[in-house]
Each structure stands twice: as structure tokens, then as C-alpha cells.
């Protein structure tokens, strides 16, 4: 029976055992078809391998020759070569020869041959061993030199650049570089770069590159994986962004290794070849990554060193310049390691100040040499060292009387550090507070006024002895806890004021018959005390409301004390609110000092302004006044003037060109220029109101004098004006009795009536003036017909007009009824017409009115008389003003008319042109 034999399996095993495989070359497609052994040796994923890719697997020093020899098969029959290739097992030597070749019918040439792994030729092995030893020595020397540079140079950048240059020279690369990530590893920037001659640097263009723009590259580096590319074609398909940026830089091969510190990637170092392809060896990567680790470690060491130096410097400066006393002490032990003392190894100047001795007196010396208390302190320190705890204590230095709070701890064996915080101010403050508290309690208990303290809800917390006496309280506990707002003597309105206002003072008749059941008292129900009470809210240092403080003064027995308190308060209120007195004290030489708020206000300055920006500048002072003040300062500096007093003008805030008056008094209080001190005390106070009052008094005086002159003239004129009609009345009355002629009697009677009317008008004007002066001028407003009023006046005045003068009712409305005082309107219009009759000898006098708008009527009397000069038109409505002294009248008619119209809510005026006539008018609001 025949046995089936599987020769293919035997051949495969034989191929592995003999380390031999076959290949078939297609010169048309330029590809090899490889056996299983060849595929495994070369690391192929499939059976086919291009001529070009196989050429790249041949070691560089054999690549060109072997590729050329193989292509020569097309013309030669023999091909037999031994050469090194890059394989899955590194660089190995292979033997390759052609078995046969044939041409297919289509003319395609195919060749069949074998590829066998062989041992390295002896001469080549010796050569490579020597080269490898030299390379290893070079690389070891390079690493040692790199470490030496970092240890030697303060500037690590120089060492880094030297290493990068060595790498560039060794690999004959195009550029060597270091990239660094930011803290969040979002951006990468080129921090170091060296380039070969003729290769363009890329550093400036590779700053702030987003890490996520190169996802494959970043993932490799962050995973602490190197990137070794013999060609860019080895990039994965999804690394198109990486391919694009590398291709732009004309990179053929590259090697990149991550830079790691504390297991964290902080950057990477790489080398680019731009002129050729390189098959990277394990030795290449090991050396390159070793240098990268050297750089990374040395940078971190330098950072650590720099950080340690900074930290040491910081701590040294901190201990020397911090506002704490610092001392470091070392425990001294004998040969048996028994402690017997300690000495000071370091201390800062503040501790020396506390101790009151120079540092040289104790640094480096044992405690017993400068302190009598060393022995007990040693036990104290040993306890801290042995227990590993810290202790705190308060102490006072005898020489300096400095109080300190001390914290003592042991940083390491037999070492003790003590920190001294100056608490002198705090101790003194506590002593002062203790003294103040005792003083307050003493005052609270013995002040001659009742004091009550309530919490924020109105419950009584404390009460002093005087208050217990005032209210007849036998035991303080009888009243503690009563509520202020439930007191029957406190009204609801008063309780509301106390709760809403910060300070309330009031007088209260405190009746004890109302307090039954409120608290127990020794006072009788009939007793009533008269209290002056002040309640103020109490706030803590943060401004939080905490309660009420009440002060009670028994007004019955303490009226004098209350009066003094009131007078004192009112005095200061008067000063602050009304006196406007400012005070300042300063040194003339440096213009430093202080002033109260009112002084700044009087000077027209903001209270936050520095005195040096005001004194000697006086930007708000009137120029001539400023010169007087500066002249005094110049004389005061040389001792020629001791006092200055004057009234100064200060520009009024917000009112340019207007001035306040300020009286200033300055006195030289201390003159010691040799000690840099010329002390001035200045007082200023605002006298603007005094000046304005003075001006008003002068104006009133002038008006009074004018009025006096006018009244004198008026009395003289009145005596004449009254005497004239009286003489006529008396004279013509006598003549009437003597004559029997009736015509003559009628003429005398007409003269007497005319003078009666004149005398009556004079007396009416005087009476009206007196009523105006007394404020008793009466108005009776009723509905009236304006047309009837004007017609009556025109009809009456026609009889008084001179021959050749016509009195007319001019412009008017068809119908007009208003509510006003008919008699007063008649008085004003009639006065206008009477004046017109006096000064009009020919022409006409027109009485009329028209409607200005819906709420006003304008009445007027226009004549063709002599007119009024412009300078007299402003005075015409004044009292006792007469344009013609030869014309009868008091000079009061127009003044009275003006008063009537103004009291009716209207306005009055005149339009006149000399020689052409006048138009007197008034406008009246009407209903």
C-alpha cells in the first residue's frame, strides 16, 4: 500500500533548517514573488516585494552596488552576491544567486533564484566589530561629555546646543531639535534647533503649534513611544496631517524620542534627515534616547537645583527679613551622646534686637556663655526634640522689655528652631484695654447719671448704681431682663423713635404709679421724677447693631448738670453748623500738618487734598490776596513776620467768578528753622454772610437816606400842595360872601369844587400809601363788565380834559366780563388818564384794552402829550417821583397803581417817546 508524502511540508522545514528561500523576479512589474522563509526574514505582510523596497532593505554601504548588479541580470547570465540587509532580526548577511531566467511569450523577463542567510564574512565582521566598538566609544564619550557640560556650565542652553550639534554631526543630519509642551500639553513649541549648512531652520515657524493638530504624532509621544521613520511612507494612513507638515520640510527619515520627567512627557527630541533615507539601528536609537534622557534629567536636575537655590534664598531672606525673630539652635552632646548644652547656629537681626545684644555675642556660642537660664531651657528644648512636638510660650526680654509669643519646634534631630512674634504692642494694648475696662466699670458704677444697657431686642442687660438710686431699685436682679419697649412710661411714638433713630433725647415726666407690675421699686406711686434721657444705638467694630445705651439724668436734682451738658452740646453744634470756623496746624518748611474739615471748606478745597497741595499754592484764592499771603510766608521763613490777619477772597465752588470772603488769622507758634520747624497755626472763618449783610445794610442805608430825602421833599411838597387848594377854598369862599353877582358866585364855586377835588385826591393818595405801608390795602373781587368800566371812565374824564384834547374809548372786545376789584381798576386807569390830561395840551387820550391770550388782558391809556425821557421811564413808578414840579400832584399815583396791579397778579409799564406821547399799560390775569 503506497503512503502519501507531503513534500511541501518537508521543503518548508528544510528551508527553515537551511535558512534558505526562493524568489522570482518579474522585471515588467518590477516585483519579487517571495517564499515563506524570505517573507518572514524580511518582515513582509504579503508575498510580493517591489524592487525599490528591497533596495531600501540593503545596508547603505552595499545598496547602490547590489541594486545595480541585480538589474544587470537582464543582460548577464550570472548574479551571485553576498551582502547585508535590514531584517526582522536586525542587520543580517544573505547570499543570493540566480538559478535561471526566462522570457514569457509577451516578452516579460522573469528570473528565479535563492536567498540564503549566511554568516558575516570574517573580514566584514572584524571591520564591523571595530566600527561598532568605535561607535560605542564615541557615543559613550559623547554622553560623558554631555554630562560634564551640564555639570560645568551654569547656562544649560549652551550644553544642550553642543549635544544637538554632536548628534547632527554623527548622523550627518539636516536638523536636530527639541520641542516642549505647555503645562496642559495643548501646545508645542520648538525651543532648541541646530541645522546643517544649506538646511533652512524651522524654529520660528514652529511656535505654539496645537498638539491636537497632529493627533497620531501627539498620541505616540504622550504614550512615551519613539517615532522612527526610515521613510515618510511608513506613516499610517490616518497621519495625513503629520505627513503634510513633514513633507513641507523635505524630510526623508527621522527619529524622535519623548522627553520624560517624573513619568510625565514634557517634550521630545528629534533628528531629521533631508538628503537621504536611513535604516535606523538599535544602537542609533539607544544612543539618541540616552542623550535625550541626559538632557531631560539634567534639565530637571538644573530646575531642581535652581528651585532649591531659590527656595534656600527665599527661606534665608524670609528668616532674615520677616517681621519675626528667628533663631536656630543645635544640641551639643558629649562622647556618650548625652546632651549637655546647646549653641546658636543662626539668628536674624530682629532676634538680636529682641535680645538687646549684637549677633556676634551669641551666634556660634553656647547658651551658657550668654544666658543664665540655659540649663532649664535645655530640658525644655530636649522635651521638644524627643517628643517631636512644638511648644508655645510668652516671654519678656529683660534688656529690651520686649514681649514676644514664641513658637519652638524641632526640624530634625538635635536641631531646634524658635520663632519670636513681637507682642509688645498687643501686651500694652491689652494692658491699656484692661485699664480702660476697669476705668469704664468705675465710671459706669460711679458716674453721677443713670446708665442702662439694653440688648438689640430691648431687654435690660445692666444698670449702674445711680440709675438704681433714681428709680428706687433695691436689687439689680429685680430689673434685669425687663423690656424697654414695654415700659408704661414709654409711649408708642417714643418707642418707634428709639428703634428707628440712631440717637434720641427727650424729657420725660416719669410717673411711678404706672410701673406697678413692671418692676419692684421703693418709690411711692405718687412720686414723679423729671428725667432728661438720651438713648443711642450701640454698634460693634464691624458696624453691626448690638443694643441701646440709655443715660438718665434726674432733672429735679441735676438740672445744673443737665444744663451744662446741653450747653456743651449746643455749643459744639453751633460751632459745627453755623460758626464756619476752620483750624489748621502745619510746618511751613515742608507744608505738612493737619486741618479740620471746615478749614478746607473755607479754602474752597476738598478735605482729602494734601495740605502741601494747598498751602503756598492757593489756586482758589484771589490773586492779590494770594500775593499778600505768600509775602507773609516769605517773611515768616526769615523771622521777619510773626502774625498775619486779613480778609481773603476764595472762589466759590461751582460758580466761577464769584467769591466767598474768608477772614484769616495765622500766627507763628514755633520758630526753629535750624531744626526744620516753623510751626504755623491758622484759623479761618467764612464771613461771606457778614459781607453780604454789610452790603445789604449799606444798600438799605442808602435807600433809607433816599426815602428820607424823598419824604422830606414829599412833606415840603405836600405842605405846598395842600396849602394851595386850601388857600383857594378859603379865599374864594370869602369872596362868595362878599359878592352878589350870581355869575361870579358860580365861577367862584367852580374854583372851590376844583380845589376840593384836588385836595380830596391828595388825601386819598396819602391814605392809600399808608395802607400799602401797613399792609391793609383791601381788595374786593366781583364780576364786572370791562366795557362799562372803561366807558364810565371815558365819559367822566371827557369833562376834565382841556380844550382841544379828545378822550376816546379805543380798541376793545365786543363783550368782556372778568372777576376783579372794579374800584382798584378804576383807580389805576383813572390815574393814567389824569396824568395824560396834565401833560396833553392837544390831540387825544385813548383808553382801551385787548386780549393778550386766553388768560391775560392788556389795558392801556395812550396820549399825544409831551412824552417821557428814557432815563426817567425806569423811575416813573417810584414813590414821590414827579416829572414836572409845576404840575399839581403827590408823585404817588403811579407808585400806588404799580402796587395795586402787582397785588392783583399783573405787571405794569410804560412806552414813551419824548415829544410824541406816552402809553401807560398793565397786563392782568383774568378769570
Image (cartoon, rainbow, N blue to C red):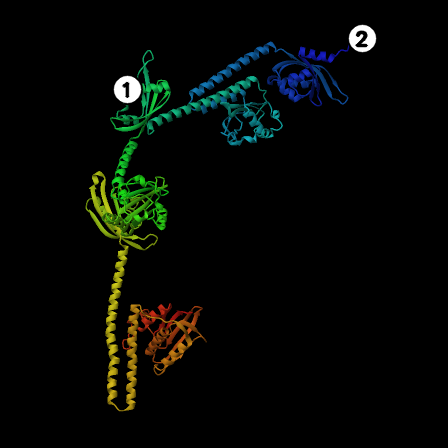
Q: Quadrant of residue 78?
A: top right
Quadrant containing the C terminus in the rendered view: bottom left
Q: Does residue 632 sit above or below 95 in this rendering?
A: below
Q: Is residue 608 visible?
A: no
At x 37% / y 22%, what residue is drawn?
389
Circles 2 and 1: CB distance less than 8 Å?
Answer: no
Residue 901 marker:
none
The single residue placed furthest to the right in the displayed view is 1
Classify mark 1: helix, strand or loop: helix
Residue 772 appearing in the image: yes
The residue labelled by disc 2 is: 1
Residue bearing the label numbered 1: 374
Q: Is residue 214 left or right of residue 877?
A: right
Q: Is residue 6 left or right of residue 195?
A: right
Q: Position of residue 649 (x, y in %)?
A: 28, 53
Viewer-nearest of discs 2 and 1: 1
The N terminus: image quadrant: top right
N-terminal-most mark, 2 or 1: 2
Number of callouts: 2
Residue 499 vs 726, above or below: the answer is: above
Amino acid at each position: 500500500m503506497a503512503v502519501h508524502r507531503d513534500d511541501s511540508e518537508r521543503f518548508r522545514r528544510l528551508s527553515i533548517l537551511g535558512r534558505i528561500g526562493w524568489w522570482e523576479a518579474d522585471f515588467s512589474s518590477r516585483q519579487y514573488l517571495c517564499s515563506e522563509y524570505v517573507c518572514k526574514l524580511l518582515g513582509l505582510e504579503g508575498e510580493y516585494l517591489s524592487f525599490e523596497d528591497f533596495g531600501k532593505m540593503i545596508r547603505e554601504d552595499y545598496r547602490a552596488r547590489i541594486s545595480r548588479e541585480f538589474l544587470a541580470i537582464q543582460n548577464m547570465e550570472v548574479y551571485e552576491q553576498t551582502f547585508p540587509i535590514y531584517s526582522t532580526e536586525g542587520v543580517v548577511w544573505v547570499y543570493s544567486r540566480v538559478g535561471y531566467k526566462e522570457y514569457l511569450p509577451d516578452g516579460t523577463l522573469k528570473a528565479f533564484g535563492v536567498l540564503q542567510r549566511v554568516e558575516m564574512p570574517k573580514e566584514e565582521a572584524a571591520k564591523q566589530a571595530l566600527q561598532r566598538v568605535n561607535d560605542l566609544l564615541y557615543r559613550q564619550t559623547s554622553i560623558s561629555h554631555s554630562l560634564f557640560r551640564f555639570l560645568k556650565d551654569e547656562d544649560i542652553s549652551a550644553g544642550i546646543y553642543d549635544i544637538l550639534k554632536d548628534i547632527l554631526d554623527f548622523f550627518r543630519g539636516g536638523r536636530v531639535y527639541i520641542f516642549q509642551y505647555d503645562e496642559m500639553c495643548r501646545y508645542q513649541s520648538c525651543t532648541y534647533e541646530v541645522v546643517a549648512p544649506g538646511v533652512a531652520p524651522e524654529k520660528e515657524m514652529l511656535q505654539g503649534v496645537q498638539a491636537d493638530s497632529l493627533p497620531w504624532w501627539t498620541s505616540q509621544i504622550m504614550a512615551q513611544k519613539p517615532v522612527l521613520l526610515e521613510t515618510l511612507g511608513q506613516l499610517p494612513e490616518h497621519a495625513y496631517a503629520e505627513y503634510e507638515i513633514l513633507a513641507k520640510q523635505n524630510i526623508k527619515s527621522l527619529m524622535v524620542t519623548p522627553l520624560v520627567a517624573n513619568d510625565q512627557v514634557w517634550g521630545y527630541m528629534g533628528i531629521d534627515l533631508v538628503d537621504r533615507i536611513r535604516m535606523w539601528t538599535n544602537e542609533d536609537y539607544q544612543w539618541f534616547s540616552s542623550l535625550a534622557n541626559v538632557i531631560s534629567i539634567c534639565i530637571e536636575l538644573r530646575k531642581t537645583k535652581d528651585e532649591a537655590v531659590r527656595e534656600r534664598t527665599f527661606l534665608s531672606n524670609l528668616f532674615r527679613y520677616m517681621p519675626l525673630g528667628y533663631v536656630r539652635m543645635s544640641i551639643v552632646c558629649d562622647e556618650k551622646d548625652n546632651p549637655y548644652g546647646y549653641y546658636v547656629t543662626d539668628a536674624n537681626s530682629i532676634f538680636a534686637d529682641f535680645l538687646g545684644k549684637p549677633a556676634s555675642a551669641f551666634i556660634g556660642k553656647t547658651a551658657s556663655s550668654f544666658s543664665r537660664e540655659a540649663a532649664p531651657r535645655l530640658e525644655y528644648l530636649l522635651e521638644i526634640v524627643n517628643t517631636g512636638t512644638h511648644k508655645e510660650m510668652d516671654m519678656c526680654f529683660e534688656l529690651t522689655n520686649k514681649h514676644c509669643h514664641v513658637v519652638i519646634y524641632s526640624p530634625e534631630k538635635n536641631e531646634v528652631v524658635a520663632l519670636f512674634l513681637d507682642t509688645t504692642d498687643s501686651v500694652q494694648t491689652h494692658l491699656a484695654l484692661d485699664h480702660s475696662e476697669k476705668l469704664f466699670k468705675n465710671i459706669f458704677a460711679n458716674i453721677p447719671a443713670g446708665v442702662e444697657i439694653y440688648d438689640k431686642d430691648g431687654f435690660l442687660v445692666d444698670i449702674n448704681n445711680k440709675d438704681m438710686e433714681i428709680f428706687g431699685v433695691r436689687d439689680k436682679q429685680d430689673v434685669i431682663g425687663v423690656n424697654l419697649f414695654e415700659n408704661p412710661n414709654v409711649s408708642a411714638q417714643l418707642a418707634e423713635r428709639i428703634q428707628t433713630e440712631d440717637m434720641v433725647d427727650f424729657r420725660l415726666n416719669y410717673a411711678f404709679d404706672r410701673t406697678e407690675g413692671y418692676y419692684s421699686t421703693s418709690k411711692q406711686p405718687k412720686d414723679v421724677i423729671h428725667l432728661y434721657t438720651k438713648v443711642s444705638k450701640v454698634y460693634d467694630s464691624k458696624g453691626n447693631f448690638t443694643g441701646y445705651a440709655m443715660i438718665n439724668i434726674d432733672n429735679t436734682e441735676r438740672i445744673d448738670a443737665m444744663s451744662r451738658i446741653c450747653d456743651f452740646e449746643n455749643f459744639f453744634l453751633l460751632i459745627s453748623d453755623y460758626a464756619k470756623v476752620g483750624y489748621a496746624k502745619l510746618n511751613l518748611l515742608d507744608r505738612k500738618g493737619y486741618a479740620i474739615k471746615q478749614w478746607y471748606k473755607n479754602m474752597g478745597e476738598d478735605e482729602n487734598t494734601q495740605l502741601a497741595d494747598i498751602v503756598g499754592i492757593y489756586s482758589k484764592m484771589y490773586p492779590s490776596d494770594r500775593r499778600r499771603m505768600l509775602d507773609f510766608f516769605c517773611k515768616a521763613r526769615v523771622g521777619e513776620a510773626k502774625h498775619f490777619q486779613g480778609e481773603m477772597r476764595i472762589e466759590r465752588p461751582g460758580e466761577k467768578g464769584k467769591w466767598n470772603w474768608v477772614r484769616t488769622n495765622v500766627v507763628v507758634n514755633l520758630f526753629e528753622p535750624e531744626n526744620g520747624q516753623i510751626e504755623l497755626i491758622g484759623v479761618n472763618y467764612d464771613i461771606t454772610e457778614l459781607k453780604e449783610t454789610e452790603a445789604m445794610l449799606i444798600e438799605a442805608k442808602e435807600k433809607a437816606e433816599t426815602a428820607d430825602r424823598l419824604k422830606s421833599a414829599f412833606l415840603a411838597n405836600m405842605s405846598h400842595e395842600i396849602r394851595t387848594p386850601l388857600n383857594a377854598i378859603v379865599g374864594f369862599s370869602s369872596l362868595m360872601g362878599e359878592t352878589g353877582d350870581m355869575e361870579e358866585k358860580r365861577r367862584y364855586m367852580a374854583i372851590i369844587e376844583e380845589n376840593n377835588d384836588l385836595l380830596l385826591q391828595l388825601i386819598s393818595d396819602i391814605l392809600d400809601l399808608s395802607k400799602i405801608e401797613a399792609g391793609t390795602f383791601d381788595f374786593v373781587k366781583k364780576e364786572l363788565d370791562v366795557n362799562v368800566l372803561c366807558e364810565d371812565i371815558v365819559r367822566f374824564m371827557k369833562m376834565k380834559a382841556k380844550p382841544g384834547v379828545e378822550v376816546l374809548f379805543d380798541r376793545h372786545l365786543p363783550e368782556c366780563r372778568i372777576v376783579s376789584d372794579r374800584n382798584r381798576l378804576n383807580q389805576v386807569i383813572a390815574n393814567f388818564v389824569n396824568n395824560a390830561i396834565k401833560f396833553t395840551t392837544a390831540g387825544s387820550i385813548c383808553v382801551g384794552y385787548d386780549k393778550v391770550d386766553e388768560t391775560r388782558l392788556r389795558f392801556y391809556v395812550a396820549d399825544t402829550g409831551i412824552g417821557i425821557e428814557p432815563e426817567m421811564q425806569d423811575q416813573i413808578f417810584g414813590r414821590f417821583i414827579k416829572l414836572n414840579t409845576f404840575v399839581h400832584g403827590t408823585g404817588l399815583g403811579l407808585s400806588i397803581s404799580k402796587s395795586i396791579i402787582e397785588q392783583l397778579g399783573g405787571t405794569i409799564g410804560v412806552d414813551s417817546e419824548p415829544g410824541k406821547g406816552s402809553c401807560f399799560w398793565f397786563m392782568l390775569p383774568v378769570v
